[in-house]
Image: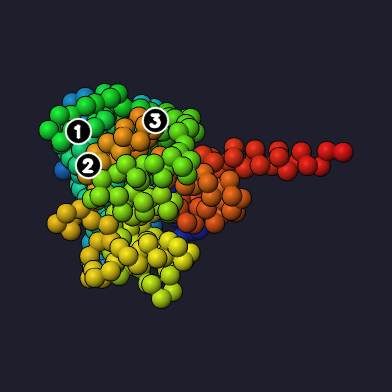
């Protein structure tokens, strides 16, 4: 054997006295089976490996305590990959079977097996929480909601993930083709347009911008627990969730103050305070609906928005006229009661506010596409046209400066042109 010859050569070179035969064989066994390991990244070397006694894998050291294993098949070409981690706390090795990676070829097999082994080892090293509790895609989604409670993501998971075949796919088996199939089903699923009080539903084709929004929560949930796969391979799960470019169009429909006043006047008494609140502040309808009496301080004229898309509470100061409106709404209400509520003290929600707003739009003779979000867009537009700094507008609206610039930057450019025109001689 090459190892035994190397030992003998070294002993002769040092002119050492020969080792006892049994010690020499023990030493050579240690070198051969413990210190010498194949380079599994080399395809040729991997293909020459033979099955070992007891189906023990051939191991490749990735880093201290972390090994990647390969067990050749006794019947067919290829084999199965394993990960091994030495747990110093228990003084024991932990092992996990990975996959045969039959859909990959060449060097991509080793690359993906290495990524999966290191990810699993990191999980075990950090306490094994993910390994014990997170097995399937559904598990990853539920864990994401526990860490970042979000009604939007919860709704997406409930409608498009939990009852879909993707929910049962194991995370360590998840591949690009699984998510491509899920995305195709998502794109074919119609989006609800409206539902009348009689229960009739109307649908429309799902827009690319809607597809982007519906994919975002799943991409975030999987990104917490999976490493990115090699580009242009089936292991690159993230590529199937790449959003459409240019899907978000500039918001065009705008209601000026006179039109918004007509909308308020045409709204029924139950929803009128809620609609008026939308017209006074650049808040998302859902954020306005979740405000409670305790969120408003009449003495300081401050309002805390605790529920919103980014889940980061913020405080804004109200001018006296708007603070007076809020003071009327919280009068005789408990701190835990909703400021704007339906009969029975139920909070407003999308399926509740869209009907009275749609009826008011028709009664006021406004464009039929106007909605609660049209009001918010119109309010933000007025703030930008009033030359309020974009950063301040973003803080009031609870969004990013990038989003304000993307959707309303053209208004600032128009103002810039007007300002430049004053310099003409």
Nearest-to-viewer mark from 3 and 2? 3
Q: Give how far across and how far down residue 215 sits, in percent.
A: 33, 37
User: Which residue is tagged 3?
Assistant: 367
Return the mark for residue 195: 1
Residue 329 at least partly seen: yes
Decide which of 53, 162 is in the foreground and name it.
Answer: 162
Q: Is residue 321 above or below residue 61?
A: below
**Are there few (<14), some (14-19), or many (20+) residues within 10 Å of tag 3?**
few
Q: Is residue 350 left or right of residue 317?
A: left
**Are there few (<14), some (14-19), or many (20+) residues within 10 Å of tag 2?**
few
State which tag comes first along the sequence, 1 or 2: 1
**According to the image, what is the colour scheme of the structure?**
rainbow
The quadrant where residue 191 appears:
top left
Q: Is residue 16 above or below residue 107?
A: below
Q: Residue at x 28, y 69 (%)?
A: 331
Q: Is residue 248 above or below residue 338?
A: above
- Mark 3 residue element: loop
- Mark 2 residue element: helix
Decide which of 314, 355 is in the foreground and name it.
Answer: 355
**Are there few (<14), some (14-19), or many (20+) residues within 10 Å of tag 1?**
some
Query: Residue furthest toward the bottom?
Result: 299
Q: Residue at x 39, y 41 (%)?
A: 262
Residue 52 at least partly seen: no
Quadrant of the rendering where the N terminus is positioned = top left
Q: Give how far across and how far down residue 299 sits, in percent.
A: 41, 76
Q: Residue at x 20, y 48 (%)?
A: 139
Return the mark for residue 245: none
Return the mark for residue 351: 2
State which tag comes first along the sequence, 1 or 3: 1
């Amino acid at each position: 054997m090459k190892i035994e010859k190397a030992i003998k050569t070294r002993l002769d070179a040092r002119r050492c006295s020969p080792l006892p035969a049994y010690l020499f064989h023990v030493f050579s066994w240690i070198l051969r089976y413990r210190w010498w390991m194949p380079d599994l990244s080399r395809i040729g070397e991997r293909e020459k490996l033979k099955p070992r006694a007891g189906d023990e894998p051939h191991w490749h050291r990735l880093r201290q305590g972390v090994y990647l294993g390969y067990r050749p098949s006794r019947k067919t070409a290829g084999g199965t990959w394993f990960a091994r981690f030495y747990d110093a706390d228990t003084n024991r090795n932990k092992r996990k079977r990975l996959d045969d990676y039959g859909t990959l070829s060449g060097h991509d097999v080793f690359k993906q097996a290495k990524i999966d082994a290191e990810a699993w080892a990191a999980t075990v090293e950090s306490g094994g929480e993910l390994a014990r509790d997170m097995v399937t895609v559904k598990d990853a989604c539920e864990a994401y909601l526990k860490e970042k409670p979000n009604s939007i993501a919860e709704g997406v998971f409930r409608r498009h993930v939990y009852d879909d075949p993707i929910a049962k796919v194991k995370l360590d088996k998840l591949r690009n083709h699984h998510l491509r199939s899920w995305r195709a089903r998502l794109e074919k699923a119609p989006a609800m347009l409206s539902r009348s009080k009689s229960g009739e539903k109307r649908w429309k084709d799902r827009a690319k911008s809607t597809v982007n929004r519906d994919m975002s929560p799943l991409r975030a949930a999987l990104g917490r627990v999976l490493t990115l796969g090699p580009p242009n391979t089936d292991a690159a799960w993230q590529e199937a969730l790449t959003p459409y470019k240019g899907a978000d169009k500039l918001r065009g429909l705008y209601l000026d103050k006179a039109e918004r006043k007509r909308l308020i006047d045409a709204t029924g008494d139950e929803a009128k305070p809620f609609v008026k609140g939308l017209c006074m502040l650049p808040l998302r309808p859902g954020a306005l609906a979740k405000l409670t009496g305790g969120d408003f301080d009449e003495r300081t004229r401050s309002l805390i928005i605790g529920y919103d898309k980014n889940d980061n509470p913020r405080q804004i100061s109200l001018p006296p006229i708007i603070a007076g409106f809020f003071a009327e709404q919280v009068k005789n209400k408990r701190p835990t009661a909703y400021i704007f509520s339906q009969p029975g003290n139920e909070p407003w929600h999308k399926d509740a506010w869209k009907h009275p707003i749609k009826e008011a739009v028709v009664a006021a003779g406004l464009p039929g596409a106007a909605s609660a979000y049209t009001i918010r867009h119109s309010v933000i537009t007025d703030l930008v046209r009033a030359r309020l700094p974009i950063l301040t507008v973003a803080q009031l609206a609870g969004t990013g400066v990038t989003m304000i610039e993307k959707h309303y930057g053209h208004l600032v450019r128009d103002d810039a042109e007007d300002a430049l025109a004053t310099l003409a001689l």
